[in-house]
Amino acid sequence: MTQPVKSLRVLHLTFNMGIGGTEQVIKQLVLGMAEENVASEILCIDGYIGPVGEALQKIGVPVHQCQRKQGFDWSLTQTIRKRLRIGQFDVIHCHQYTPWVYGWLGALGTNAKVVFTEHGRFHPDKYRRKARLINPILARFTPAIVAISEATKKALIEYEYLPADKIQVIYNGIKPLNKDNEAVAGIRERLGIPTDAFVVGTVSRLDPVKNQSMMLKAFKLFLQKRPDSYLLMVGDGPDKDLLVNLVDEYEIGTRVIFTGFIDVPLNYLGAMDLFLLSSHTEGTSMTLLESMSLQIPAVATEVGGNPEIISQNVTGRLTKPGDETSFANAMAELAESSQLRNDMGEKASEKFAEKFSAKVMKQHYFAVYANQKY
């Protein structure tokens, strides 16, 4: 008689489960791993859970929270250790650097193996003396370290002094998307966008690192070639007022639409003919993956993980960061040919299915977890 496979238990340690790429990855892993007999829980260390975590709680996923104190909080390591012992976890999956440090210390004296995923980098990256001293020790006793792109791996080696042979790359993944054409038409109508207008746009936090001010400059230039166009900016954030003021300064207010935060932006993304990403830095952009799944070509800056996602002149266009002229020219080239956009969209969808689906990501992480278990 075949013995049933024992459930593998994983605790995800993160700042919170608000809105962002890291949170979406954790959600995909928690839900997807249930099919692999992996029981998952989440511990948020910043004192609140957030909407993604609350949604998971509603469907029965245990999501816990604790409040990290200012400075280095040694009591947090005790809280993590207690949670690991109560839950009898096999793996503690630490998302981002700070949770890794606390999770590594919290796992001491337990049976839990540490997995660390670096989801992205600050801009600009900086060298830290403490990292040179501490990180090699943390890495030596961390069974698995994951970077979400080759660019992120390179940064971990250069700025965090982590050994290259200890880091593996696992790209972020999402479930394939399907837009609702009727809902898309309704969104365009509600926003006052004519049916024959050309729509470019982004779904992103309005944040300095995303450099949407450059996007607005590029869009102003682009309007000179395609005056029938609209820019749809889906999201909210600290740069909102600055960007609104720039729109007024550039006198393009009738062509730029700020939607604010949209909980499920799928059909807003589906309303776009061309996806834009103007960031100073990126790991693996979840909204870029969403656009690929929907067969929407992209114009993006050649930073971070973007060149690993976009195949230049095959699934989209890449331009140098901060160069609004090149960004606008790339937009104009794709706007001129619907056939080119269709071809790029199809190739983007194919590449998505091959490398960036939630199924592929889950398979890679399951192998990581299983290696720690046995």
Image: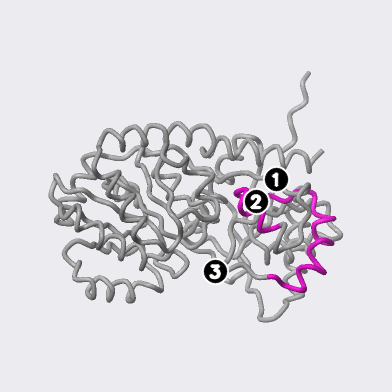
Could you tell me residue 281's position as x and y percent?
A: 52, 60
Left/right placement of residue 86 relative to residue 19 reads right
Left/right placement of residue 252 relative to residue 168 reads left
Could you tell me residue 374's position as x and y percent?
A: 82, 38
* Disc 2 element: strand
What label sits on residue 48 in the rendered view? 3
Is label 3 in contact with label 1 (beta carbons under 8 Å)?
no
Q: How is the image coloured?
A: one colour
Question: Reading the chain from its start, which is encountered first: label 3 or label 1?
Answer: 3
Question: Reading the chain from its start, which is encountered first: label 2 or label 3?
Answer: 3
Could you tell me residue 141's position as x and y percent?
A: 84, 55
Q: Amino acid at mark 1?
A: Gln
Residue 225 on the magenta span = no
91 over 348 or under it: above or below: below
The magenta region covers 127-156
Distance from disc 3 to disc 1, alpha carbons, whole Å, reads 31 Å
Q: Residue at x 25, y 63 (%)?
A: 220
What label sits on residue 168 in the rendered view? 1
Prevalent SS, magenta region: helix
Left/right placement of residue 120 relative to residue 187 reads right
Q: Nearer the viewer, residue 229 or 187?
A: 229
Is label 2 in contact with label 1 (beta carbons under 8 Å)?
yes
* Disc 3 element: loop
Q: Amino acid at mark 2?
A: Ala
Q: Residue at x 31, y 47 (%)?
A: 274
Q: Amino acid at mark 3?
A: Tyr
> How crowded is the residue under tag 3: few (<14 C-alpha within 10 Å), some, or many (20+)?
some
Q: Nearer the viewer, residue 118 or 370?
A: 118
Residue pointed to by mark 2: 147
